[in-house]
Image (cartoon, rainbow, N blue to C red):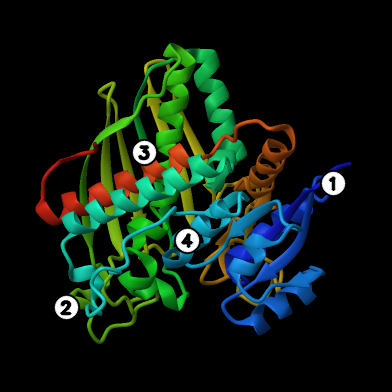
């Protein structure tokens, strides 16, 4: 059987997630190369996963005739360069979320990029998106946006229920929150492109957009798109009342937010409310609620109650994995039997590989990545100006 040959750029946490998903689809996927900013990291990754070749840099990987698809698993501020290089070499592209961002490239003397005008950022992001879109379209490459929520079984089930009921969706409420990233790059705008809204909010924002697209295609043959946003962001771990008191969430943010809420307005008049915060203890919350004309649906991607456990102390379960970002294994917990599958990672990579092999479209492509970026940066402008922002 013919296999898709993958080259991974990056050797960190998300590269490991992608690698596990590729292994689940080993019948149609073969990871043949890897590179990283530090070659020793790529060499260690290659040894761990049995990858035959380590490239010196992403330019070399993208130019290789051994590679069909370039998988972009770098920090977000490096996405643009790798995407453009892959497109110039006519390689298909898998890109981890979010697509791109503003990192102060045109303000090299500014260290605290997060203090710059969000309206300026929004304009620069729109320019970047246009450039990327032009490059990808010209190359003929497939762009596959690694938004795993779109492939989560609970979201797929929600869509089937929407279809059979033919209901009108009034409102979607969604959340991605936890107690804060441990990654150093996440602390500063110049490397992350934003805080909790960007890192966490990209999941639920993309998914509510996807669900409204689906509703529109199902009923009228065209997507229902977001047209405006109203947002608020905050740095709640910087509150004066917290100073000197114990804090069990990450509080070392530099110039990025740790709390956000975004209200999306769609062209059919429906609404969506999305929370994304770094101040939520008790593990990752990945949740979507749908309120419609004929019913309501709640999708608890994580945590869910397919399993419930209790332990009087955190040592009872030893090294056994319970769920992501859980601060303690003591007390009542909700062990995930297969969190990887529940969150849609293997299904995502299967869709991408089949799209390349069979020449078909992917469920999560450039249009979803583009609309998600526009919503997020419009939300930053809205939060800064305190008013609704329309998306062009």
Instruction: Work out whether residue 324 or residue 144 is closer to the camera in this orientation and state it.
Output: 144
Of mark 1 and mark 3, the one earlier in the sequence is: 1
Residue 357, image x, y percentages? 74, 38
Q: CA distance from mark 3 to mark 2?
A: 31 Å
Tell me what residue is drawn at x 43 percent, y 15 percent: 167
Q: Measuring from the top left, give residue 195's x and y in whole percent.
A: 33, 64
Circle 3 residue: 173
303 or 311: nearer the viewer:
303
Looking at the image, do the residues carrying marks 1 and 3 touch, with CB atoms under 8 Å apart? no
The residue that disc 2 covers is 240
**Residue at 51% across / 71% down in the picture?**
327
Residue 226 seen in the current view: yes
Nearer to us: label 1 or label 2? 1
| Residue 155 in the figure: left or right of residue 41 | left
Q: Residue 339's spot in the image, x, y percent?
A: 64, 53
Is residue 6 positioned above or below 270 on the image?
below
Of 209 and 70, which appears nearest the observer? Answer: 70
Question: Quick check: can you spot residue 336?
Answer: no
**Nearer the observer, disc 2 or disc 4?**
4
Counting residues from the N terminus, which is met first, the one under dot 2 or under dot 4?
4
């Amino acid at each position: 059987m013919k296999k898709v040959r993958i080259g991974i750029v990056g050797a960190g946490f998300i590269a490991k997630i992608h690698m596990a998903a590729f292994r689940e689809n080993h019948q149609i996927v073969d990871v043949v190369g890897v590179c990283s900013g530090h070659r020793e990291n790529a060499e260690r990754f290659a040894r761990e996963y049995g990858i035959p070749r380590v490239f010196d840099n992403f330019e070399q990987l993208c130019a290789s005739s051994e590679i069909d698809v370039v998988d972009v698993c770098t920090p977000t501020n490096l996405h643009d360069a790798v995407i453009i290089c892959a497109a110039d070499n006519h390689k298909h592209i898998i890109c981890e979320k979010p697509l791109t961002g503003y990192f102060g490239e045109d303000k090299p003397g500014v260290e605290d990029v997060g203090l710059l005008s969000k309206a300026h950022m929004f304009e620069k992001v729109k320019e970047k998106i246009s450039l990327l879109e032009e490059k990808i379209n010209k190359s003929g490459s497939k762009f596959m946006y690694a938004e795993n929520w779109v492939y989560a079984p609970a979201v797929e089930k929600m869509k089937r229920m929407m279809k059979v009921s033919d209901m009108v969706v009034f409102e979607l409420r969604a959340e991605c929150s936890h107690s804060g990233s441990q990654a150093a790059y996440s602390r500063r705008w110049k490397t992350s492109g934003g805080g909790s809204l960007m890192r966490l909010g990209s999941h639920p924002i993309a998914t509510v957009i996807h669900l409204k697209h689906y509703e529109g295609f199902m009923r009228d043959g065209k997507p229902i798109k977001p047209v405006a946003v109203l947002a608020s962001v905050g740095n709640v771990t910087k509150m004066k009342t917290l100073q000197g008191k114990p804090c069990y969430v990450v509080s070392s943010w530099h110039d990025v937010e740790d709390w956000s809420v975004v209200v999306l307005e769609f062209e059919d008049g429906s609404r969506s409310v999305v929370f994304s915060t770094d101040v939520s203890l008790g593990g990752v919350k990945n949740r979507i609620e749908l309120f419609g004309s004929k019913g309501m649906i709640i999708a608890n991607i994580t945590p869910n109650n397919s399993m419930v456990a209790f332990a009087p102390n955190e040592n009872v379960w030893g090294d056994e994995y319970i769920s992501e970002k859980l601060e303690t294994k003591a007390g009542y917990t909700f062990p995930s039997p297969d969190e990887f599958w529940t969150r849609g990672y293997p299904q995502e990579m299967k869709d991408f590989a089949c799209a390349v092999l069979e020449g078909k479209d992917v469920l999560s492509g450039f249009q979803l990545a583009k609309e998600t970026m526009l919503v997020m940066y419009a939300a930053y402008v809205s939060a800064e100006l305190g008013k609704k922002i329309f998306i062009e």
